[in-house]
Image (cartoon, rainbow, N blue to C red):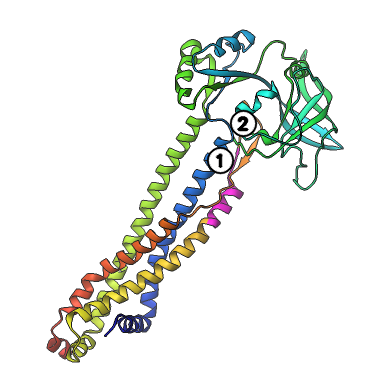
Amino acid sequence: MNIFQLFSLSFEALNERRLRAGLTTLMVVMGASLLVALNGTGNGFTNFVNSQFSSLGANVLIVSPRGETIDIDDRLVNEIARIEGVYDVLPYIQQMSTITSGGQEQTSIVVGGEQSKLPLLFPTMNFESGTFVSETDSIGIVLGNELARSSDQTKTFATLGQTVKIKYQTYVEQKTVVIQRSFVVRGILNYIGSGIVPADQMAFISTSAAKNLFNRGNKFDGVYVVTDDPELNDAVLQELRNRYGNDLIIISPQVISNVIQQISSGVYLFIRIVAMVSLLVASVGIITTLQTSVMERIKEIGLLKALGFTRNLILGLFLCEAMIIGIIGGTIGVAFGMGLSHGMSMLLSRSLHFGTSAGVTAGQTFSLHIIPVFDPWNLLSTWILCVTLSMVSGFYPSWRASRLDPVVALRHE
């Protein structure tokens, strides 16, 4: 008897007990689908985090004052620039403002700084149209890619050469005063995709224009510290803390990225263990199913042995049943897991939004847009695991069936 005949007999035996076999196969499907879904979503989340932080240079530290204990001015900027390992320092001024264009309004962070150095922060930054605003330009403005679109992303908010108006509220002698000024769009950026510093939703003006518009005098809201190499980030960060203690808030995007990935890896490891437990439960179900099948088919086994079936053929017959459960469950589980991963990603994109009220991302809201990524080897290994675990689980009942005495089996009632 060849392998195809064995599989045919095994499939017919399972088909006669389709409800029990179906429920057992469903256990395998659930375990396999959980493993595949978690792997796909986990890989997608890792890529999402990497893409969000890769658009902002890995050798960048974001420094801002803690309260009013220290002022960031030209003197402090020069001191930081002289620290060993620092390549450049970019002071910035920022203000949450309302930008008006052609009757439309959008709320955005307006940042004042030396724009020619922005590519040090965003290596992938380039223009859809126009160019940077020079430090001597007091009326020029550059818009992020998403800001240049209307709020519903279907229309254009502003175009190159168009005049837009920036306005914000401040307090003068305990009275609310609205300050506004017109600017000309000198450039529109291509999409960058950074989350921690949302350049796509920001507007950029020159340092002199920002000082004048936002009345900052000689003070800055913070600085971007660009190091010579990402490996020097920790050393520069430690030197800043040694010099200024807790007077400065120092953010390292690379450290944040690493921490997020470590936390997510721990969470996904825990959930993968849960998925493995579900596969172990499925293996118990396979043992139960085949053991029950052996008990119900004792006379049939005795008849097969009387017809010349050897112990190896009986063993192979029942192992094929376990293998079929693993093959069907693993195949459906892998396919269902891929669909489940996409469903989980859509759910995360719609339900998880992160907003901030302070710092460089003040007032911005971000959504998770995770695209599942599947490694063919992971899919294959999950499928092999299901088939292997099913065969291992089915070995003992199969062995029991092969060891039955044919005379005793034929007399069994």
Image coordinates for residue 158, horizontal then vertical, percent: 81, 37
Residue 82 placement: quadrant: top right
Near-viewer residue (42 or 22):
42
Q: Quadrant of the C terminus?
A: bottom left
- The residue depicted at 52 percent of the width and 39 percent of the height is 50
In 3D space, how far apart are the residues under numbered discs 1 and 2 (Cα atoms)?
12 Å
Location of residue 395 by image quarter: bottom left
- Secondary structure type for disc 1: helix
10 displayed left or right of 410: right
Secondary structure under the numbered disc 2 in the rendered image: loop
The residue wearing badge 1 is 51
Residue lying furthest top in this view?
75
Query: Is disc 1 surrounded by few (<14), some (14 to 19) or many (20+) residues within 10 Å?
Result: some
Highlighted range, magenta: 342-354
Q: Closest to the observer: 189 or 18?
A: 189
Question: Visible in this render: residue 334?
Answer: yes
Is any atom of residue 175 visible in this view? no
The x, y position of residue 108, in whole percent, is: 72, 32
Which of disc 2 and disc 1 is earlier in sequence?
1
Query: Residue 75: horizontal and vertical position, in percent?
Result: 61, 7
In the rendered structure, which amino acid carries the disc numbered 1?
Answer: Ser
The residue located at (15%, 81%) in the rendering is 404
- Relative to 124, residue 406 above or below: below
Position of 179 relative to 160 (above/below): above
Which residue is the site of mark 2?
122
Residue 397 shown in magenta: no
Residue at point 58% right, 53% down?
Answer: 346
Is 378 on the left-hand or right-hand side of 138? left
Is most of the magenta stretch helix, strand or loop? Answer: helix
Q: Position of residue 274 (x, y in %)?
A: 37, 53
